[in-house]
Structures are given as structure tokens and as C-alpha cells.
Image (cartoon, grey):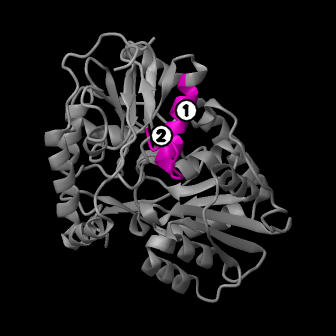
Amino acid sequence: MFNGRIILPCRVSAVNPVVKKAGYTAWRLLPRAFRRTALTSVAAQLARKPNQPEARTSNGVVVAGDIAGNNGLAETARLFHDVIHAAGLSRGKVPLGLPGVVEMSRVTVPPDAALLAVVNAPILPVGLLRMPRNLLKHRRVIGVWAWELPVLPRQWQLGTQFVHEIWAPSSFTADALETIAPGRVRVVPYPLAAFELPVTGDRHSFGFNNDTVVVLTAFNLNSGMARKNPLGAIAAFKAAFGTDETFQFIMKISGAESYAADLRIIIAAIGGAPNIKLINENFTESSLRGLIAASDIVVSLHRSEGFGLIPAAAMLLGKPVVATGWSGNLTFMTPETSALVSYRLVQPVDERGVYEVAGARWAEPDIEDATAQLRRLGHDAALRARLGLAGQTHARAVLSAAPVLAALNANGIT
């Protein structure tokens, strides 16, 4: 403690690099499911839990998470902080997450502020082990969690010991979380409409012709190729427009450096199509939004979403969205404001094993319906404009700062 504030130290590993590498290699040889469960289980035993009951009121809130990261969850953490800061309730930001992913730094945390942890349940205990033991003492702790199926993996239950309340970005995710934390879950959509979204780039800078209808899909392979379903999007585009170069399909991907086999499958599915372009590079958030704004249609034939950041950003930018009509994206999408694709529910098949949870189901979008939706929008500029405006108006109303501010007030954060 120093002047009434908790000091978070910078941790430096003293482990011999050779030993460290050998240990990591041995760890990776263990089954993936075992690794995930074991890491969370051990951390949950060792990390200190918050007080029960917690403080009734808090002097502002500290936002914790992968604050400096280049991913959707990190962007969400920054967005929550910006909303809280604008309300005059921010008491700082704290790096919190897995070693090797989130770099620790020396920061201060007021002892009477609440902690908003934008860190999913299985990672939260592991991240807390890197913090001082008394960090959560007498502190209100709120978790911001997102999951993409109606059923949760077993290790998520362990994370409920470390939070007093959980914020879910959609009713879809909230329903799943209620099964492990009944009465402690609140729906708080990501406040993407709280501020004007910064945009970098235009059609000229991305090389799009004015007379070309650009269809875009964007995803990170770290989020799972089976769940994001780019092969379905390729099939729908080819069926809708064939090789007509009046229509161009842009596939913006990231994370391919870790999933070379997935990238090869995508390239094979594209084949020799002259009107499909693959962009395999990391963009800043503003450049990604610029790409969205420069496109004419955004498509997401996902099998499941906890929320759907890309479709949400597209709607806020006034772009018509063709998306699977199931899961968390229905928080901000309706049949009147977007082109929802029909589906059937099936048992998840995921080569990585992340989403093969007992009893779970996810959507298999109807490619024929997606094809018809793309063709209808692709050939009707007036329809694209009407649907884009309707989606933008609806998303602005649903994704404002109001739910965040109401949730802070309900938690006694002033």
C-alpha cells in the first residue's frame, strides 16, 4: 500500500529460458481440454476471492482487461472505459489477463473503486494470480463475459467465485450465464454507439471501383473458423454472383499466422474466382471500420455469436448486413433492419474442440437463403440504402451508453 492506493508491481520471470521452453512444449502435448480446465482449476484454488458481501457503494470504477491488445475483447474494454470516463466515473485502467498475452505494468488502483473485469470466466482466476493478494478486498467486482453457445464449458463455473455481478452483451449470452450464476447476470450491450466511430480510409484507398458492388466479410481466425463459417460465405457469394466482376467479395482475415491449415482451406475454397480478394493482414480498428464503410454489403454467416462486433459496426456505419438470424447478433438486428438468414440448429463440429460442449447446439445457415439475400441487395442500390439507414437508426438506439450508465448506477458506483 502507498498513500492508500494499491500498487501493482511489474512481474519479471526468473525462469531459465531453456527450462521455460521445455515446460511449455510438454504442456502443449497434453490434451487441449485438459489444459484449459487444469489451468483454470488451479488458479481458482490459489487466487483470493472478493469479500462477500462486498462494499455497497464504490467511488468510481477501474476497468481491467487486455487494455493494449489488438482484438475484439480489448477494444470492448477500451470502449467501456471511454464511456465510464465520459461519465466522470473512471478511476483508471489495469492490465489483466494471461501471461504471454497481457503485459503487466506498474499502476495504481484506488481501494474504494469497483473493478470492471473485461476478462472471460476461465481466464479471470489466472489473471488475478498475477495481482496483489488484497486487490479484491472490500471491492465490488463485475465481470464482462461473452460466450457463443447456449451451454457453457464446465470451467466457467469456477470464475463465478470472483465476481459479484456479470454483464453479458446479449440476452443470448445472459441466458447461458444464468445457469451458473442465477440472479447475478445483467444484459449490457456493448456501447458502440456511445461515440462516433473513427474511420480511416475510403473506396479509393482500398482500391474499389465506384461501379463495383463490394461485399465484405471480416473475421479473426483466432475466433474459430468453424464458428465464423467463411466457407459458407464464399459458397453464398459464388452462388449469387458467379464470376461477374461487377461484384467483388472481400475477405478480410487476421490471425492466419497461427492457423496456416485454415488459411489453405479458405484459399482452396476461393479457387480461381476472379472477383474474390483475400486480405490477410492486421488492421487498426479505425482502418477496419474504414473497410466496412467503403463496402456496400457486409455478410456474416456465423454459426454462433455472443454479440457480433463486425455486424454491429457495419450497421452503425449505415451498411446493410446479411447475417445468420440466430444468437447474440439479434441484440441489435431485426428482420426489419437487416437481412436475417434462415438456419437449422445442429450439434457443433469444431476441429479445435472449443465449441464441442455436451448438449450444445449452433446454427447451420441456409446457403440458398443467404444467396437470395445477397442477390436481392446486390442488384438493388435503393434497397441497400433503405436497409442501411434502418439498421443504423436501430443500432444507434440499442447500442448507446444508457445501459452501461444504468448498470453502474444499479451497482452503487458513483
Q: Residue at x 73, y 59 (%)?
A: 296
**Residue 108 visible to an observer of this rendering:** yes
Quadrant containing the N terminus is: top left
Image: 60 above or below 298: above
- 304 within the magenta span: no
Check residue 398 in the rendering and tell me which mark sits there, or answer none: 1
Residue 299 in picture, x, y percent from top left: 59, 61
Identify the image quadrant of residue 44: top left
> Does 231 sit left or right of 393 as displayed?
left
Image: 314 above or below 295: above
Q: Residue at x 59, y 44 (%)?
A: 336
Tag 2, which secondary structure?
A: helix
Q: Residue at x 44, y 74 (%)?
A: 259
Range drawn in magenta: 65-84
> Does 376 sit left or right of 131 as displayed?
right
Check residue 5 in the rendering and tell me which mark sits there, or answer none: none
Q: Residues within 10 Å of mark 1 (few under 14, many from 20)?
A: some
Residue placed under numbered mark 2 in the picture: 331
**Residue 400 visible to an observer of this rendering:** no
Q: Residue at x 57, y 18 (%)?
A: 87
Give the amino acid at mark 1.
Answer: Val
Image: 36 above or below 207: above
Callout 1 touching callout 2 (CB < 8 Å) = yes
Residue 370 in picture, x, y percent from top left: 54, 65
C-alpha gap between disc 1 and disc 2: 8 Å
Give the amino acid at mark 2.
Answer: Thr
The disc, 1 or 2, on the residue closer to the chain's N-terminal end is 2
Residue 291 in picture, x, y percent from top left: 70, 58
